[in-house]
Image: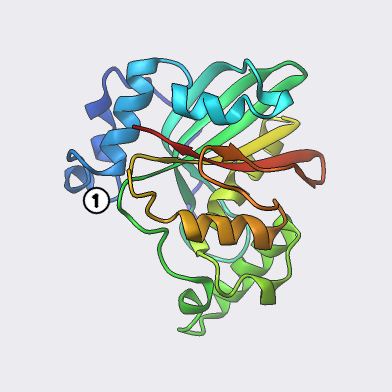
Amino acid sequence: MAQLPRIHVPLRKPEDVIPHLGKGDQHWRDGYSAKSVCTSWFSANDVPHAVRHVLDQADEYRGAELIDAWLERCTHLPWGRGNPSQTDLLAILRLKDGLGVLGVEAKVKESFGPLVGDWLQDGRPNKAERLGGLCELLQVRREGVTNLRYQLLHRTAAAVLEARRYAAQHAAMVVQSFCPNRTGLADFEAFAEAVGFGAVQADRISRVKQLGTVSVRVGWAADA
């Protein structure tokens, strides 16, 4: 796999992210998550209110200061071959006791993609190797993730891997939902429960799960 770039230039306006989107300007439309999350974070130039409301429920994230954020951040998954996990937005936060890494998965009406069981159906050994690595990192049994959305697994793993890379003590993966009907919430709740974060509802953050040196939480931010 080609090495991911570590040299970056700043985005001057939300539209500058279009060349980095998976399908380019096809996703740059009102009512789609790519445009919604860009507009939200550029407008705030900080952690948007809906996301901060969720983070502030956890003592370690209360009053977090945004240091830097990247749109469409690619994180290498070191198991098997395949694409990196492309997080909609990755933020580095200054917390009371050090650094925290926040991965944001933005959604409007889009789903979280295939279930793990469906994703594995083609039988490619590379997928089995990748899933094994994700489960080991997240400390969950493989047989317990078959009916979960694969995207939620690797997005959460990406936040943990980036936290390790930045030597951060804390990581969080928050779904920033712009859908008034909360599309995908049931899938997110099932994921959080099965992976060990406990019961999570809309506008709430989970309890901590300790993964090695990194304390991890997940949450759902309903954004108007």
Q: Position of residue 191 (x, y in %)?
A: 59, 59
Q: Position of residue 166 (x, y in %)?
A: 67, 30
Nearer to me, 85 or 207: 207
What colouring method underlies this structural image?
rainbow
User: Residue 40 is drawn in which quadrant?
Assistant: top left
Mark 1, other Cα within 10 Å: few <14 / some 14–19 / many ≥20: few
- Left/right of residue 112 with respect to residue 57 in the rendered view: left
User: Residue 163 is drawn in which quadrant?
Assistant: top right
In the figure, 202 relative to 191: above or below?
above
- Left/right of residue 10 with respect to residue 148 in the rendered view: left
How many numbered marks does the figure carry?
1
Q: Going 29% across and 34% down the picture, which residue do you hit?
A: 36
Which amino acid is tagged 1?
Lys
Q: Going 56% across and 47% down the picture, which residue do you hit?
A: 201
Q: Secondary structure at mark 1?
A: loop
Nearer to me, 140 or 134: 140
Q: Position of residue 185 (x, y in %)?
A: 46, 53
Nearer to me, 144 or 24: 144
Q: Going 52% across and 55% down the picture, which residue do you hit?
A: 188
Q: Position of residue 51 (x, y in %)?
A: 49, 29
Q: Which residue is mark 1?
A: 23
Q: Going 72% across and 30% down the picture, which residue do you hit?
A: 168
Q: Quadrant of the C terminus?
A: top left
